[in-house]
Image (tube, helix red, strand yellow):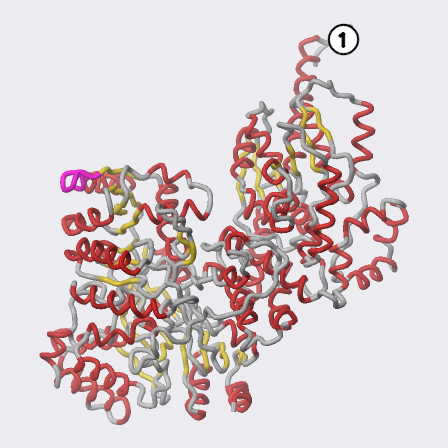
Amino acid sequence: MASDLARALAAAVRGEVRFDTAERAVYGQDASNYRQVPRGVVKPVDREDVREAVGVCREFGVPVVARGAGTSIGGQAIGPGAVVLDFRRHLGRVLEVDPERRTARVEPGTVLDELQRAARPFGLRFGPDPSTHSRCTIGGMVGNDACGSHSPAWGRTSDNLEGLDLLLSDGTELSVTGPLPPAERAALAAVPGRIGRLHRELQALAADNLALLRRAMPVLPRRGSGYPLDALLPERGYDLVRAVTGTEGTCALLLGATVRLVPEPPARALVVAGYPDETAAADAVPALLPLAPLTCEGMAADLVAALLAAGPRPPVLDRLPDGACWLFLETGGATPAEAADRARQLADAVRRERAAAVALVTDPGEQRALWAIREAGAGIVTRLPPGPDGRPGGAAWPGWEDSAVPVEQLGSYLRQLRALLGRHGLRGVPYGHFGEGCVHLRLDFPLRERPEAFREFLLEAADLVVAHGGSLSGEHGDGQARAELLPRMFPPEVIELFARFKRIWDPANLLNPGLLVDPRPMDADLRFPGRELPLTLAYPEDGGSLLSAVHRCVGVGKCVDTTTGVMCPSYMATGEERHSTRGRARLLGEMLRGELVVDGWRSPEVREALDLCLGCKGCASDCPVHVDMATYRSEFLYHHYRFRPRPAAHLSFGWLPLWLRLAHLAPRAAGAALRGRFSAPVLKRLGGVDPRRALPALPERRFSAWFRAHRAAHPVAGDAPAVLLWPDSMSELLDPAPARAAVLVLERLGFRVVLPSGPVCCGLTLVASGQLGLARRVVARSLRNLGALPPGLPVVGLEPSCTATVRADWARLLPGGASELPSRIRTLAEFLDERAVELPELTGPAMTQVHCHQHAVLGTGADQRVTARLGLDNRQLDAGCCGLAGAFGFERGHWEVSVAAAERALLPAVRAAAPGTLLLADGLSCRTQLTQLEPGARPLHLAEVLLRAFEQAEQAGQAGQAGQAGPPPGHSPG
C-alpha cells in the first residue's frame, strides 16, 4: 500500500514526495519525547499541491499531519503511519504587507522572522514572539496558538489573526474570520452544502451548551489546553478564527492567513528586578501588570547555573542585580529617552512595591544579550547542571513544559510545584512568562530507566495545576504529552463536546488523529529505546554513550535557522531536514534503535546524511545542547569503513600531510604535476577531487627549512622569553607564510621562537575522515616529538582547526594521555592578548572571516581585542562556514554545497567591501575558498596583518629619521 500511495502522490503533486527510510526517520520526531514513524513525507509547492495531497490521502484512508518547523513539544508534528505535509520547505512566502490596514497575508510555512523582516520597514511587527522565532512558522503558531514574551502587550496568536483560509479533510475550502454579528452568523448557516452544515452544527454545539461552556472553560490568558469552544459563544461573536486556532492541526489544514500587525516601538529599555527566589518574584507580578510593561518574564538562578554549565560566563550576567530570580520588564517609546523614562518609572514602582534590587538596561546590545539568555532557555535547560546536593547533572525532558495558572495564584503554584518535584525526586529549571502565569519546566524524568515515573508525576501535576484554576498547557498545546490528562481539567460533558467539535470539522478523523480526542497514552511511543554499541572515541559528557549523546538533540531546531550563525551550513544550502544537525541526530538515533534503520554502522542512510556534514563543529557551540555532529561523524565513518575500502578522498586528504612530505622530496616535480595540463586532472580523479577545484600550489621550501636559515642569519638572545610555535602540517608543508610572519612578529616583540624537535601533526585530516586508529598513532608520535614541555613554556598555534583539535579532540582520542598541551596551547591572538604586548597602529577598515573551529572551540574575543589595539575598524562577518571546511569543498560531489555556503553571506560581503579593506582569515580553508571563488580577494592571517603593521611603523620611523637628519649637501627643497 505504501508504494501505491507514494506513486499516487508523486503523480498528483509537483512538490517532493519522499517515502524513503531516511526521510521517514527524520520526520518521525519533533521536539517532544515521542517517536512516530510516518508513512511518507510530501513537500507541497503551492495550495494546489496541498489539495491534491489531501485528496490522495483521503482516497487511501491515510492520516495527514501538518508540519512547520517541527518544534512541537507535545508531539503534534508527528503521526504513526501518516503522511506528513512539510509546509516550511516551499510554502513560506509573505504575500503582502498592507501598512494602512496593518495586516499581512502569509503562507502557512512562513517563518516568523521572515514576516517580521517584511513588516519592519513600515514600523510594524507581528505581536507574538515565541523563543523559536527564527524558525517557527505561522502555521505552527496558529496550530498551538503560540504566545511569546510580549503577550502581555500584544496577546497571543489568536488575538492577532484577521482571517484563515482552511482546507478540510473532505476537500472543502472555506475562509473564516473573527467575531460576527447575528445576521452574518445566520447567513453562514443558511449556505447550502458542506459549509452551511458545518456552520449550523457549530452554532448548535454552542447553543445547546451555553451554561456548560460558560462555566467549565477556565478564563485565563494562557489557556492552551483543549479546544477553545467558548469562542463559539454568542457573547464572543461566534469567533471561528479563535475557535480553530490552537486545535493542533486536528480540525483543518491552514492554506493561508491574514494576520494583524502592531506598531514596533522604535526604542526599548529593560528593567531587571532581582528577588530572593522565584516565589517572591511571582508574588510581585500582580502589582506590576497595571503599569503595562511590554514583557514580564521570570528567570531564576537555576537557568543561569545551567547556562554557566553549558559554556563560558557571558559578561552581560554582570548586569543582573542581586537576587536568585529576576523579572525582565521591558518598556517602549518613540525615542530612547522616552523608553528609558518609562523604564525609570517602572523601576521606581518595583522598588516601592517589594524593595527589589533593580538594574536599568538601556544599551541595545546589552538588552539583546540578556534576552538571548532567556530565549536560549528552551535548549539550555535540557541539560541540568550538577545539583547543590552533589547530584550529577544530566538530561531534562518536556512533558510538564508550560503549565499556566492565574497570575494571582502563581506564587502558591510554584511553591507547591517545587514540593511536588521534591516528593518525586525530580529536578528542573522553572522560568517563563510570569506576567501571564505560565511556567516552563523540563524535568529529569528517568524515561529510559523507569518511564512509569513520568506518568506518576504528570497525574499529580495535572491535579495541582487544576486546583489552582489553571491549564495543563499555557502555549505549546496538549499533543500526546497532555491530552490524556484533559479529563482532569474538564468535566466529562466538555470532553464529549471536544469529540463532537472534532467530528464536525473532520468526520473521517484523518487530520492528526490521536491527539486531543481519543489520545494515545502519554507514556507510549517514547523515542528513547536504543542499543549501546562499542565506541572508539570517549564521550565523557555523555557517560561514554553515543545513544545519550545523540539524544542531546531535543528538536528545538536552532540548526534550521537559515539566517545567521555557523550551523548548519549544509542545511542552509539544501534546505533538507536530513542535512540539519537535528536530522542527522535523528538518523543516528534510529541507527542505534535498529528498527527503521537496520544496518547499524553500515547504514547507507546515515552515511548519505553525514556525507554533507562539513565537520565545521558549529553545532558543538551554537546548538543549545551542544550536539557535536563532527565527532559523531568521525565515529560513524570509522566503523562504517572499518575493514572496507574507503573513498579515494579519505586517502588523498586524510593522508595529506604524508603526501605533502613526500612531495617536498622533489618539490619542483611535484609542483609541476599539480599544475600540469594533463597531470592535474588525473590527480584530481585519482584523489576524489572535484574537477572544478584548483589544486593548491606547493611552496618552494618547508617552513622549518626557512626557520633554520632565518635563525642562522638572525640569532636571538638566549635569555629572551621562549615561545613554542606549533608548526602544523599545513603551515609546515603547504602555506608557510603565516608561520614565517608569526616568527618575525614574535621576535619583534622580544620573544625567542622555538620549534618541536621533530614533525608534529594534530591528526585532524585523519579524524575528519574517520581514520581514528591512524589518528591516535599520529598524535602519539607528535607527543613524542614534542617532548616534555618546560614549565611555563607557552605554545602558540596558527591554524585554528589544528589548534582546536589539540585543545578539544585529543582528549577524546587519547583519554588521559594527551599531556598538558591541550590546556597550554593558545592562538596567536590569545597569546598576545594575555601578555598585553604593545602593538603598532594599522588603522583602516577590516573584516574577519572566522574559522568555524575557532568559533566553536577557541572563541574570538582575543582577536577582536588585538585588532582593536591595532586601530583597525574590524567587522567580524556573520557569514558562517566558508564552505570549504578542509577537504569537504574539494571532494567530488560537494562543489554545489560548498559554493552555496560561500555565496550565502561571505562572498557577497567581500564583494561589497570598500576598497582598501583588509580581509582577515586565519583558517587556511577560508583563505583557499576566498582566493579560488573570488580571485580579487587577498585574505591574510592575523600574523601577516601584524607583520604589516610592524613594517609600516618601521618604514615610518626610518622616514622620520631621514627627515630629521636634513637634506644632503647641495640639496635644496622644491
Please state which amino acid type lies under the numbered disc 1.
Pro
Q: Is residue 412 above or below residue 476?
A: above
Question: From which residue to which does the magenta span run?
Answer: 348-356
Number of other residues with Cα within 10 Å of mark 1, as a class: few under 14, some 14 to 19, many 20 or more: few
Q: Is residue 295 above or below residue 96?
A: above
Residue shown at the point (70%, 12%) measured from the top left: 973
Q: Is residue 966 above or below residue 143?
A: above
Question: Can residue 951 be seen at all in this image of the molecule?
Answer: no
Query: Magenta stretch: residue 278 in it?
Result: no
909 lies left or right of 241: right
Question: As rendered, which of 334 and 772 lies closer to the eye?
Answer: 772
734 lies left or right of 160: right
Q: Is residue 301 above or below residue 883?
A: above
Residue shown at the point (74%, 58%) measured from the top left: 693
Instruction: Give x and y (percent) for residue 419.
Output: 23, 56
- Location of residue 895 by image quarter: bottom right
Instruction: Give x and y (percent) for residue 668.
Output: 89, 45
Question: As rendered, which of 93 and 224 lies closer to the eye?
Answer: 224
* Label 1 secondary element: loop
Question: Can residue 823 be seen at all in this image of the molecule?
Answer: yes
Instruction: Give x and y (percent) for residue 695.
Output: 78, 53
Residue shown at the point (74%, 21%) measured from the top left: 716
User: Which secondary structure is most common in the magenta stretch?
Assistant: helix
* The C terminus sits in image quarter: top right
338 lies left or right of 24: left
Question: As rendered, which of 820 and 637 lies closer to the eye?
Answer: 820
- Location of residue 827 by image quarter: top right
Instruction: Give x and y (percent) for residue 822.
Output: 61, 40
662 lies left or right of 568: right
Q: Name the residue under label 1.
A: 968
- Location of residue 916 by image quarter: top right
- Residue lying at the far top of the rendered structure: 969
